[in-house]
Image (spheres, rainbow, N blue to C red):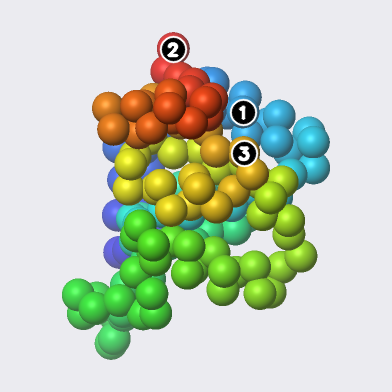
Amino acid sequence: MRRMLHADFMRDMIAPLRLRKADALLAEHRRRGDTLLIITATNAFITRPIGAWLGVDDLLATEPELRGGRYTGKIIGTACFREGKVTCLHEWLAEHRFDIGEASFYSDSQNDLPLLELVGKPVAVDPDDRLRAIAGERSWPIISLRD
């Protein structure tokens, strides 16, 4: 049942949102041999299939607790939100060779400031107003992936 729900969700809700420029950006990072990692506050139940569909192998997301085939409403580990994203990233980095100073991080939200400030190449993508202002003040690139 869960797989059918995922398939319907991907077809009806996610596929229509796929952006040509985002696919091109991912392809460019792949061409350069970059590690592709999604870091998101959205739970893994939703985002893991999206990451797989995009060809992104690694995912850091809030992990919902599952007991007896049902979600409990609780999470496992650290909530991957704001500063929690940094905690999750540091846990991931402990197991992967990776230079965070060379990393790019793309975000549309001021909620991701802790991560944007951590990486060597922060990029604001179709940002909210607050992130747009901060990116402008800090001379971070601001791009749009929308056609």
Tell me which amino acid carries mark 3: Lys
- Secondary structure, mark 2, is loop
**Image coordinates for residue 53, horizontal then vertical, percent:** 53, 44
- Image quarter hosting the C terminus: top left
Within 10 Å of the Cα at label 1, are there few (<14), some (14-19), or many (20+) other Cα atoms? few
Res 100 quadrant in image: bottom right
Specify which label sits upstream in the sequence, 3 or 1: 1
**Which residue extends farthest bottom?**
68
**Image coordinates for residue 68, horizontal then vertical, percent:** 28, 87
Specify which label sits upstream in the sequence, 2 or 3: 3
Q: For the residues marked 3 and 1, what is the alpha-carbon distance in whole angstroms?
A: 14 Å
Q: Residue at x 62, y 38 (%)?
A: 121
Label total for image? 3
133 sits to left or right of 92: left
Q: Residue at x 30, y 64 (%)?
A: 1
- Secondary structure, mark 1, is helix
Specify which label sits upstream in the sequence, 2 or 1: 1
**Which residue extends farthest left?**
73
Nearest-to-viewer mark from 2 and 3? 3
Q: Residue at x 39, y 48 (%)?
A: 112
Task: Find disc 3 in the rendering and name its residue.
Answer: 121
Task: Find disc 2 in the rendering and name its residue.
Answer: 147
**Image coordinates for residue 61, horizontal then vertical, percent:** 42, 62
**Which residue extends farthest front?**
137
Within 10 Å of the Cα at label 2, are there few (<14), some (14-19), or many (20+) other Cα atoms? few
**Image coordinates for residue 77, horizontal then vertical, percent:** 39, 79
Q: For the residues marked 2 and 3, what is the alpha-carbon distance in whole angstroms?
A: 23 Å
Q: Which mark is residue 25?
A: 1
